[in-house]
Each structure stands twice: as C-alpha cells, then as structure tokens.
Amino acid sequence: MKEKPKVLIVDDKIENLVTLERIFSDMDVEFVRALSGNEALMHTLEHDFAIALLDVQMPEMDGFETVELMRQDKLTKHLPVIFVSAIYTEDYHKIRGIASGAVDFITKPIIPDILRGKVRVFLELYEYRLSLEEEIVRRAEAEEKIQEQYDEIQIHAHELEASNEELRNTQEKLIGLNREIQESEERYSDLFDNANDLIQSVDAEGKFVYVNTAWLNALGYDKGDLEHLKFADIMVQEELAPCLDLFERTMRGEQFNNVQITFVTKHGAEMCVEGNVGARIKNGEYVAARGIFRDITERIIAEEKQRELDAMKSEFISNVSHELRTPLRSLKGFTKLLVSGKVDDPKTQNEFLAIVDKESDRLGDLIDDLLDMSRLESGRFKINKEGISLKNIIHDAVERVGSLASEKGITITEEMNSELPEMEVDGKRMGQVITNLLSNAIKYNQENGSITVKSEVSNSDLLVQVSDRGIGISEDDIPQLFERFYRVEASDRIEGTGLGLHITRQIIEAHSGRIWIESKLGEGSTFSFTLPLRQN
Ligand code: ADP
C-alpha cells in the first residue's frame, strides 16, 4: 500500500498542533508532531516529509534557527517549510523567514483554505518528486538492465567475432583447398585434353562419362552428340559381339592391354585403334570402363602398303628374271646355231645376227632401267641439260621403235604443228621418256593399230602427247600407274617390269614438268607431258 505523505508540524504548544491537524483533517496525510526545533530535526532524520509547518517563536531554538540548520543538512536542504506565526507578523519577520529558507510565511489568524491550498501545492510537488525519483530509479534499473544486456551482447559479439574469425580461417583454408583441387583438376584435364591418345570413360550402362579432345577430334563428334551415344554405337558392326564381351569382362575387373578395336567415326569412316582397357573402382565397385587408345589406322595402311609393295617387289623380281632370261635364251640359241656352223646361208646368218643385236639392245635397255631405278632410290639420278630441239629427239625415238611397231603392223604418225624452239633439257633422258611412251603404246596396242605423236607450244610450255588406240586403262588403275613396279593386272601376259612409267615421271619432274594420262578401257590412251620452255 502506498504510504501517505508526511507533514511535519512543529509548535511548542500542543493545542496549536491540534488546530493544524484539524485544518488538514480532510486531506489524506500523516502528521508527525514536534514540540521543539530539536525534536523537529530528529524527525527529519527518520522521515521523508512532504512539507513542514513551523512555529517561529519556540523556547531554546526558534523556527528561524531550526530552518537554518535544516538547510545545512543534505537530507533537509530542500524540505519546503512554511512558517505559521501569531506574534511575528511584521514584514521584516517575514523577510527573515524567507531568507532563512522558508517558502512561505503565514500569520495568524490562519485562513484554513489558503493554508490548505498552499500545502496542497507542496503535497503535489512532493508526489511529483516521488514519482520523479521512482522514475529515476526505474530508469536507472532499466539502464542497468540495458547495460547488462549490452555487456552480454558485447560478450556474445566477442564470441561471434572469434567464431567468425575461425570461420573466416576455415573458409580461407577451404578456398585454398578448393583452388588446389581446381588447379590439380585443371592440370589433369589439361593433360588428358592435350594427350594425343584417345581417352574415354564409359559407365556401367555403356554411356560416355568422359572423352578427351583428341577423342572428339579423331571421331568427329561434339560433346552434344555424346549425350545420346553409347559406346556400342561407335563400334564397327562386325566387332560388336566381342566388344560387348570385352566390356562386360572389364566391368568385372579384368584389364586388357593392346586390344585392337575398330571405331566408326561420325562421318562413317572406320578407324582402327589399339590400347588398354580397365575398370575404375569406387567404393569397391566397378563403376566405369576406361580406355586409352591410339589411332593405328595409318599404321595399318602403311603396313598394308608395305605388304603390297613387298608383293609387287617379288612379282618384279620374277618379272625381271623373266625379262632377262627371255633375251638371254634367244641370244644363247642363235649364237649356238651360228657357232655350230650349221647355218651356212649368209642371209639367214645375217637375220640371226640382227636378232642377236636386237635382243642385246633389249637386255641393255632393261639393265639401264634397273640401274636408273637404283640411282633414283639412292638419289644419284642425274640430269645433264643442254640446248636441244625436242623435234629431233622425238623423231629419233620414233625411228628407234620403228621395227617393233612394224612387227605388229602399227603405224606411227608424227604431228609437229609448229617449229619447236630449242630448250635446255637432258636430250638422252628425254629420248628415254619418248621411247618408253612409244614402246608402251606399241606393247599395249592391237595388231595393225595406230599411234600419234603430237608436239606443240602451249602457253609457256611445250606439250607432247603420245596417243594410241590400244587396250586402254581403267579409271581405278590410272592413279597408281606411275608408282614403281605397278602393272595393270590385265596386261600380265605382256612382258614388262612396271618401272618405265615411274622413271618417266621422275625425268619429267626433274625438268619441272608435269605428266598425266587420259584413257578409256578398250578405246586407247593418251599420255601427255609438258615442259616449261624456259628451264630454271
Ligand atoms: P611395263 O610396261 O614394263 O609394265 P610401265 O611402267 O611402262 O611398265 O607401265 C606400267 C603399266 O602401265 C603397264 O604394265 C601397263 O599395264 C600400263 N600401261 C602403260 N602404258 C600403257 C598404254 N599405252 N596402254 C595401256 N596400258 C598401259
């Protein structure tokens, strides 16, 4: 319960105190009586008063002295005091009273309403002071609480800061680790991506999980294609069953080295690869089959070429032996007959000697071809250029093959349209070229066929063409015709070594010229070559 405000009433006459109490009987206050200044001071030590009503004239210590003492004490310094006096009624008394620290000075007879009104003001002030003090206490408490909370928050903030710092450190460590992982990933993917080998990884369902750049480039697929592709889709059909078997065994943990597989590229070409296949293990399970392959298509094509070349070489050896033996046999036969003296007829003897002469030429030509071949292979093939007109060379070559042509009833027509200028060429080698083209035109011609040799200046070149109406050459054979030892199968029964055209092309190219063939099977062929008029 709220305490009533206390009012100190001080008077040495008890009846005055009673009068005062009566005046305030309707007010809710508690009176504390004092019969002297000393007693009044004693009370102020014990109680907190809203106001004091003091008589001035009292024995021992009068009202003025009492108030003056009150003003010196901290507790009572601000206690409002109203003097009530019947004797001290002069103005100077009042002035003295106010000077000693009182708030008012009332003279008797007291007008109760006025006194009550004045006291009420001080009671209100007192209430107001109390509520202010309460408010101050409340605020102080609240402030203290806030300070406590603030301190607590401060502690939390420190803790937070510490754990933040820890987090930051961990985060930095993580970033570092991440960077390291990323760098090592980059290193690996750089390694894989720049590897020349084809690297692939296929999951248990056969889908591609990873392929490197070399793989994509070699097979022509892009990354988007891989989403719909399974490894079985890029296998050549014939190898599918063994490949699926290999895959299943790999996923059971087997490792295969140097396996050969044929892939099919996006454009449908077959590509032979060789490499190692194994499984990737994760948590004790085989999760992917990885393969590292090398494209060996080229190697296989070399190998195939080498095989063809070897076959051609052995055929060449048997051809050469045959070519050597035929003229030798006829040389031997005719010389034997001549030596035996059984042939007396000089005309027959001359005929035999002409055959011996022709066969030795043939033998000599063949040996020349073989020597040229070996010179070409060893880089010792030489061209000796001199100023010459091709016209004479062509004419001489036609003369040289004349007897061979007439044996088959073949006619050779020379068409030299314009005066051919003199050129810097190797005359002997050019003679060899034209003789070779003419003798082929005879060899691969019909009985009583015809051959034309044309020669003209075309732009800054000299163009020479040898055309026949012979067996012709198929489109498939034309590109290989200039390769050494190459012979068309259909012309197997006709003697030859497959060297002539190879040597011919080398001679033309050594003169910065070009040679080519136009031919139709069964209709005949035209061999053309050009030589620049001004040789470098
Ligand atoms: P060889 O005549 O000794 O076989 P060549 O190198 O001169 O060698 O000719 C290579 C092949 O080209 C011949 O085997 C022949 O099949 C073909 N050939 C060359 N000239 C002609 C031609 N005029 N008509 C048809 N086939 C030809």
Image: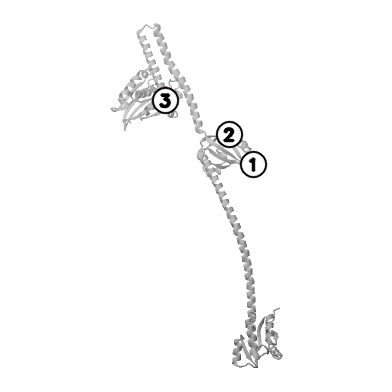
Look at the numbered disc 1 and give the secondary structure of its residue. strand
Q: Secondary structure at mark 3?
A: helix
> Residue 496's image quarter?
top left
Give the position of the C terminus as an image quadrant: top left
Q: Which residue is mark 1?
A: 285
Q: Is residue 42 above or below residue 154?
A: below
**Callout 1–callout 2 Cβ contact below 8 Å:** no
Q: CA distance from mark 1 to mark 2?
A: 21 Å
The answer for how far apart the CA atoms under marks 3 and 2 are is: 40 Å
Identify the image quadrant of residue 527: top left
**What's the mark number on residue 378?**
3
Q: Earlier in the sequence, mark 3 or mark 1?
A: 1
Q: Is residue 385 visible?
A: yes
Residue at figure coordinates x 50%, y 29% from the top left: 303
The amino acid type of the residue labelled 3 equals: Ser
Specify the quarter for ligand 1.
Answer: top left
Residue drawn at (47%, 22%) of the image: 315
Mark 2 sits on what residue? Answer: 257
Which percent across, then down, holds residue 263? 54, 36
**Looking at the image, do the residues carrying marks 3 and 1 touch, with CB atoms under 8 Å apart?**
no
Check the image and report above or below for 263 versus 24.
Answer: above
Q: Amino acid at mark 2?
A: Asn
Of 255 and 148, the residue lying toward us: 148
Q: Is residue 471 visible?
A: no
Sequence order check, earlier mark of 3 and 2? 2
Nearer to us in this view, 113 or 78: 78
- Vertical side of 289 occupied by 347: above or below: above
Crowding near the residue tagged with mark 3, few <14, some 14–19, many ≥20 C-alpha atoms within 10 Å: few
**Helix, strand or loop status at disc 2:** strand
Q: How is the image coloured?
A: one colour
